[in-house]
Amino acid sequence: MTHSYKTSKSDNLSNIELNNTSSFNHDRNHENKVCEQLKNREQQWWQAHQHLIELKERQVFWFGDNSGMMWLLWQLVSYVVVALLLMSISKVLNISLSLQQYLIIFALQTLIFIVALIFKGSIANLLQNKIYRAELKRDQALYEMVILASESVFPSVYAQAPISLQSVYEQHQKKIRLVSLYTLLKHETNTGRLILQQKTQVDLLPLNLAEDELNHVAKEMVYRSTVA
């Protein structure tokens, strides 16, 4: 009886250890999977952000306060470019274009320019719609990052707080950009679950410049948790 009881007890302990090990490995695999998903979403967020910047720069260039002057300037440049192309083509193909043919080509070019000016408002609206869609895509990527971070980044920050931004960055093997982690943790400070002791001017800077600034102050940026 005693030997059988000891054997049964030993088997039960072994089963518990195996279950604990299996549970640990499952949690570890899940965490790695979530971190990989977070890294992919971060790349999508950065790409969407960069695309949005390009669209806004295009909007300012073509439809900003000085857009009328820029349109005229580019039309003049296009005249020069087309003239050079026609001269090169005629020289290579040994074709001689008459003055009338040049005038017809420039007239068509001018007509296209006038049509573009007439529909300038419609073109601006199309570009604005692209900007709206780009903003939506960027915000969606950030929202998905926050959801994934709530399973991976945030719990460890709560458990180890007070903790610096640099420490969080190093714990994730620097696979996630420093400014991305700051943006995610900013979401938690806005909700009141984290308190940032060191205030910075990072929010006033573009992401690329913000990352350079964070490289200098990340160690001093300490987060405290208000989650019990």
Image (cartoon, grey):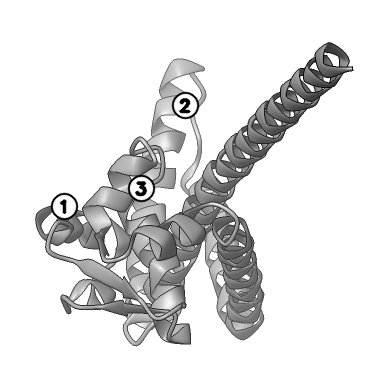
Of helix, strand and loop, which one carries label 1? helix
- Residue 37, given in percent of the width and then of the height, sits at 62, 43
Q: Earlier in the sequence, mark 3 or mark 1?
A: 3
Residue drawn at 38 percent across, 71 percent down: 61
The residue tagged 2 is 90
Mark 1 surroundings within 10 Å by alpha-carbon count, few (fewer than 14), some (14 through 19), many (20 or more): few
Mark whose residue sits in front, 3 or 2: 3
In the image, residue 164 sits, relative to residue 69, either above or below, namely above
Mark 2 crowdedness (10 Å alpha carbons): few <14, some 14-19, many ≥20: few
Is disc 2 placed on a helix, strand or loop?
A: helix
Up/down of 158 relative to 20, above or below: below
Q: As rendered, which of 169 and 106 lies closer to the eye? A: 169
> From this viewpoint, is residue 107 visible?
yes
Q: Answer with left or right where residue 49 lies relative to residue 171.
A: right
Of the pair 17 and 102, the residue shown nearer to us: 17
Position of 39 compared to 130: left or right? Answer: left
Residue 4 to residue 69: above or below: above
Q: Nearer the viewer, residue 8 or 220?
A: 8
Residue shown at the point (53%, 55%) measured from the top left? 45
Q: Earlier in the sequence, mark 2 or mark 1?
A: 2
Quarter of the rendering containing residue 225: bottom left
Quarter of the image where the N terminus is located? top right
Residue 146 at x, y = what percent? 56, 64
Specify whether residue 76 is in view: no
Residue 10 horizontal side relative to residue 40, left or right: right
Q: Secondary structure at mark 3?
A: loop
Q: Residue 99 appears at what percent x and percent y?
A: 46, 47
Q: Which mark is residue 215?
A: 1
User: Residue 84: which numbered mark, if any?
Assistant: none
Q: Which residue is mark 3?
A: 177
Measure how far apart labels 2 and 1 are at the Cα level.
57 Å
